[in-house]
Image (cartoon, rainbow, N blue to C red):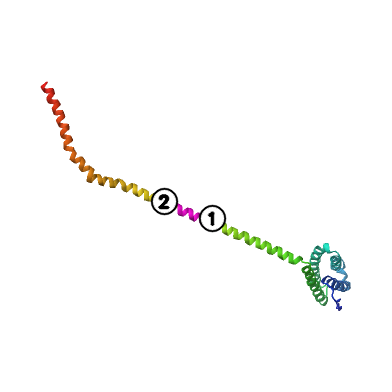
Amino acid sequence: MSMERSEPVGAGPELLCLQKWEEFTGWLLEHTAKWPKSARFSFVQKVDLQALAVLEALVAARYEPAQRRGLLREVNLRLEQLRFLLRMARGRAVMPAAGFEIAMREIDGVGRMVHGWRVAIGERAGSSRGEASRGEASRGEASRGEASRGEASRGEASRGEASRGEASRGEALAGSYESAPMGRVARGDRGETNTLTAATPAVHARGLRAPIAELDGSVTG
């Protein structure tokens, strides 16, 4: 069965999408009426209701601009559910192969039109910009984190250099303290010791004469 019909001149994406789905729904209802009676209360009922629900949502989306975005998301979901139902019907030999190919082709065509409609109203573009903004924010956070870690690393390195500098100065001071007494001892060996050694006989002489004089006086008395 052919569903080809001339498109209205200057029609918008919403009108073209609605017209195409209306034609396909009429074809599908006629097709499911020929399915086996055993599938009448399972696949037939589910497929018919899903196709009619898509048609109702498309009509509402065309005439209710305030609800358009939500309705088009619903249409997109219902189209995917209908695809799965038809695949299951084909897998159980409920739906003939020729009818299955036609249905898949028509559903894919309407799905692309719905996508174009959503782009036209800016929903998908807005979503893409939101994702891009979140991506930029994430990269900004990562960059700031890297910068903070870099600053911390440089701070640790600076503190390490300062600690090593303090240790070096401490060792230098310790070395000077250890070497200073040795210098004084050396100078003492050359100068002070000689002076003391030169003065020692006189001191000894005076020390010896005084006791002798005292002894002499005590004896004389």
How many other residues sit within 10 Å of disc 2, few (<14), some (14-19) or many (≥20)? few
Quadrant where the image shows the C terminus:
top left
> Magenta segment: does it hold 59?
no
In the picture, the quarter occupied by the N terminus is bottom right
Query: Which mark sits nearer the N-terminus, 1 or 2?
Result: 1
User: 75 or 127: nearer the eye?
Assistant: 127
Furthest residue in direction top, as rendered: 221
Q: Position of residue 126 (x, y in %)?
A: 74, 64
Q: Where 186 falls versus 125 (above or below)? A: above
Q: Is residue 46 visible?
A: no
In the depicted structure, whether residue 165 falls above or below residue 99:
above
- Say left or right for 181 vs 91: left
Q: Name the residue beneath numbered marker 2.
A: 167
98, 13: nearer the viewer: 13
How far apart marks 1 and 2 lie (CA) works out to 22 Å
Which residue is label 1 attached to?
Answer: 152
Q: Amino acid at mark 2?
A: Ala
Residue 178 x/y as whole percent: 33, 47
Range of magenta residues: 151-162
Task: Identify the image quadrant of residue 197.
Answer: top left
* Amino acid, disc 1: Ala
Q: In screen coordinates, is 196 left or right of 101? A: left
Q: Residue placed at 82% from the left, 76% from the top?
A: 102
- Image coordinates of residue 21 in percent, x first then y, are 85, 71
Residue at image point 31% right, 47% down: 180
Can residue 198 be seen? yes
